[in-house]
Amino acid sequence: MKRTLPRLSALIPYAWLLVFFALPFLLVLRLSLSDSALAIPPYTPRIDWGGGIDGVRAFIDALDFDTYKALVGDSLYFNAYISSLRFALEGTVLALLVGYPMAYGMARCKPGTRSLLLMAVILPFWTSFLIRVYAWVGILKPQGLLNAGLGLLGLPDADLLYTPAAVQIGLVYSYLPFMVLPLYAALEKQDHTLLEAAADLGSPPWKSFWQVTFPLSIPGVIAGCLLCFIPMVGEFVIPDLLGGPGSLMIGRSIWMEFFANRDWPFASAVAIVLLITLVVPIVLYQRQQVKALEAGR
Amino acid sequence: MSAAKGRPAKAAGKRLNIGAVRSSFAPWNDPAAVPLVRFEGVSKRFGDHTAVNDVSLDIYPGEFFALLGPSGCGKTTLMRMLAGFETPDAGRITLGGEDLAGIPPHRRPVNMMFQSYALFPHLSVEQNVAFGLKQEGMPKAEIAARVVEMLDLVKLKPFARRKPDQLSGGQKQRVALARAIARKPKMLLLDEPLGALDKKLREETQFELMDLQVELGMTFLIVTHDQEEAMVMADRIALMREGEIAQIGRPEEVYETPANRYVAEFLGDVNLFEAKVSAIEHPMARLAAAEATDGFYVLDDDCPPAGSAVSLAVRPEKMRISLDPPPAGTHNVLTGEIWDIGYTGDWTNYIVELPGERLIRVARANASRFVDRPIGWDDKVWVTFDADAGVVLEQ
């Protein structure tokens, strides 16, 4: 009895993955292989449980790859994927450029100040993500805070709202903590003596950064980049609220197919392709994690 | 301990006789000698704690100098000021005549071997050793040759491609050493270099470091809390206490003629007898002490005039212990009972209880394997020492 309990607890993560990842994935996969229909729910075929084995067989026969064929044939979706990947890539690079100095500064503070700053990084999570993105509408709109500030400085107005730049700002702002936290974790545990050793061996401080600090923080850089890149690709709320017609992102396409067109099978196919696109960086990330674990041993 | 200094160096084909080199090496006694490093009235405070207080110290080229003291005595701070990691609040440090003030660590011609070794974990052994050479902009071929030379020197050639994680503690220590001497610095600073090694390896490495220092002709400054380490390796020792220097001298000087009670007690074991000078009969002095009914009869070197309160310091190994009374007329006789016996193999330490519950320590080398009449617990014993065995210290 005593030994079955720990064993059962080991099953919990698997059960979690099964219920909240594998099952929904299979449902979406099944949907993507169906055809759109004017019905409730809006797709066929459905399994005829009364027909027994034959019913299931008929159901499987009716599944096809029509949606995927349509997807490949439509350049709109291809462009949306490319555009999403570009937004995510640029956003990730910008987040890294902004987040690294932040994390570096935090890691070099006194422990007391450090926890205060760490708190400040986490604090935005206490408000709804949606509200925080909405706040950017207020900042970026023509009569918003940004232009008021620019006006005070005697600078010309910047018309940013509903442009790709607004989406980029929103992405970097929203995902910055996911970049800063792993970077901070990697930088904070670095041994300060290594920098002294580098200086002792003739390396000026700026060179020590590139020779010692940065190479040792690479696991944090990779973790931060993946934590930003993966959700950025599928981001829906930010392009929807801050982006104009020019900011095509795949998350928005999925939403439109589901809710505007009510074409559930097609939306599912778009989602499945997105998932496959993202599996590559996820696998890379996991491999890197395993490597880091082995190196730590 | 001084026997170690006579050990010949076995360095790549040639044999150096350290003993011959060392016995005549005493630049600190030569008024014409120019020191390599001078600390002049150096002080350093951290908040309201004075880590180093008005320290003046000269280290000569080719010297193996040890800063010895308990933790918190300021020895590491003193070394870190020389490396440039701390700035003195007062005083001046010069290296080869040049004032080091304002020169950042990366431009100082000294290298340090860190206590934690501070090896770069992302670089291989050879990359670690090459790090300092790369900073100088040395040509690649030259760097490669120097790295091979250094790895040869510390016998780590087969491990050149390994990462620090894949090395044992002793190997890491060698990499740190090779990295620190690769740039051929004017001076090598060693911060507790052997602290993380086990006893056997520590002893071996002590001798290797001494050989290396003679072979390279480099000046070494070592910081250690381990008196044996300092005694074995150093030409001179500065014993520090609470940010100040208690005594500087050759190992045998600080051990045999300690300047004060602190030095006498820090280095090895010592029996201290509170006494009063009763008479000076040059070259001898008579001391009155509670432990000795007839008083002590010792050399009057550095002895203050009659009537002064002094401490007589006698090291345990300079006392003799016997189950039989000494012949009549013997000076410096104490009687007591064996209170405890500590057998360490090479030595036996006897704790003897004198009248008045006073405990002293007597050490005897176990020169023979079997003893006819071993001294046992509660035995009545006579402890004697020669007139020149003790040091009279002013209080």
Image (cartoon, rainbow, N blue to C red):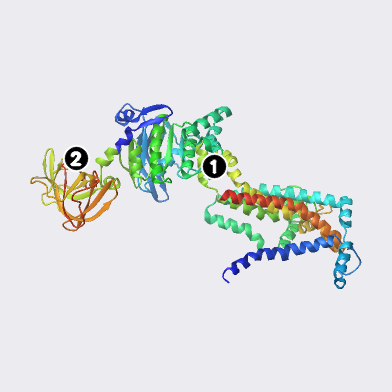
Residue B252 visible in the displayed image: yes
Amino acid beneath label 2 = Asp
Asked whether the residues under the numbered discs 1 and 2 touch, taking CB atoms below 8 Å apart as contact, a structural biologist would say no
Q: Vertical placement of A23 versus A143: above or below?
A: below
Q: Which residue is mark 2?
A: B302
State whether residue B54 appears in this view: no
Tell me the amino acid under the disc marked 1. Phe
Could you tell me which secondary element the residue under label 2 belongs to? loop
The chain ID associated with circle 1 is: B
In percent of the image, x 18 and y 39: which residue is there?
B301
Q: Nearer the viewer, mark 1 or mark 2?
A: 1
Q: Is residue B23 left or right of residue B151?
A: left
Outermost left residue: B328
Asked which quadrant contains residue A129, the reply is bottom right
Upstream in sequence: badge 1 or badge 2:
1
Chain ID at mark 2:
B
Spot occupied by residue A207 in the image (x, y as percentages of width and height): 58, 38
Is residue A190 shown above or below B134? below
* Quarter holding residue A215: top right
How far from the left and from the top, in percent, is residue B72?
38, 49
Q: Nearer the viewer, residue B183 or B37?
A: B183
Disc 1 versus disc 2: distance between alpha carbons?
Answer: 53 Å
Characterize the local packing of mark 1: few (<14), some (14-19) or many (20 or more) Cα atoms within 10 angstroms: many
Q: Are marks 1 and 2 on the same chain?
A: yes
Seen at 90% across and 68% down, the residue is A39
Which residue was labeled with disc 1? B120
The percent position of residue A31, horizontal first and vertical second, equals 84, 62
Q: Nearer the viewer, residue B134 or B128?
A: B128
Tell me: B204 left or right of A290: left
